[in-house]
Image (cartoon, rainbow, N blue to C red):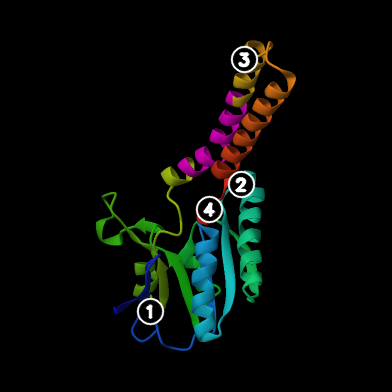
Amino acid sequence: MNQTKIMDNPPVVWHESGRAGAAIHRLLVLLPNCEFQEATLANVLWSIVSRNGATVRLLAAVDDWSDEARIRMRVALLAAMLRESGLEAEVEFVTGTDWIETVLDRWTPGDVIVSHAEQTLPSPAAARTLARIPLSQAFVGLGKPVCELRGVALPAERSVARTLVTWILPALVIVGAFIAQALFLRLAHEWAIWARQAAFIASSALEVALIAVLARPRSAR
């Protein structure tokens, strides 16, 4: 197995000799059911396609019907970013968690699989342990070229943190600002009307600014 690191931020590693400079007809991009940095992934895919003239097919995993709406929104955002870059991407939603079978059913010569270092599966060499290996190693063992990304897919703990920052903290700001403004109006009832209005407008502007900062997508920071 030959590995050639071609870029940083995020690290992109090609598995299989010569593939980093070889002609690529299509990218099979695996999208696990987790949060990922859409803008970063779109930039990486554009960088690869712009050099090789390949097409893009997004394979998005849907593990549970309750997640389907959220997954479709996430994939639609990624597809829109690719279109803005001048790329057209096919989108397919797949069920189940067997990426090996899913990809092999769709792989044709000239395809390169784009997987994530965070995607793992049990190690066949250590069946009785909890050891896991990157999904890319399984494809390499089958003789398939793989482009592996690191840091684009967000592990579960990072997804929770992202949700906390994106939704809960802005909500806390709104509640806290409401309480603070209610107390302020009680304490400042003897102030001049213009002074109270100015202070209220300033506090509202600060609240909006904080919410805007906290609610910005992670990839935009």
Q: Amino acid at mark 1?
A: Gly
> What mark, if any, has residue 67 been given in the picture?
2
Q: Nearer the viewer, residue 181 or 104?
A: 181
State the SS at label 3.
helix
Q: Amino acid at mark 4?
A: Asn
Q: CA distance from mark 4 to mark 3?
A: 44 Å
Crowding near the residue tagged with mark 4, few <14, some 14–19, many ≥20 C-alpha atoms within 10 Å = some
Q: Quadrant of the N terminus?
A: bottom left
Instruction: Report if residue 117 is visible in the image.
Output: yes
Q: Which residue is mark 4?
A: 33
Q: CA distance from mark 2 to mark 4?
A: 8 Å
> What mark, if any, has residue 143 been given in the picture?
1
Q: Nearer the viewer, residue 173 or 103?
A: 173
Q: Find the magenta span and give its range.
A: 161-176
Depicted 95 relative to depicted 214: above or below: below
Q: Position of residue 174 (x, y in %)?
A: 62, 29
Q: Earlier in the sequence, mark 3 or mark 1?
A: 1
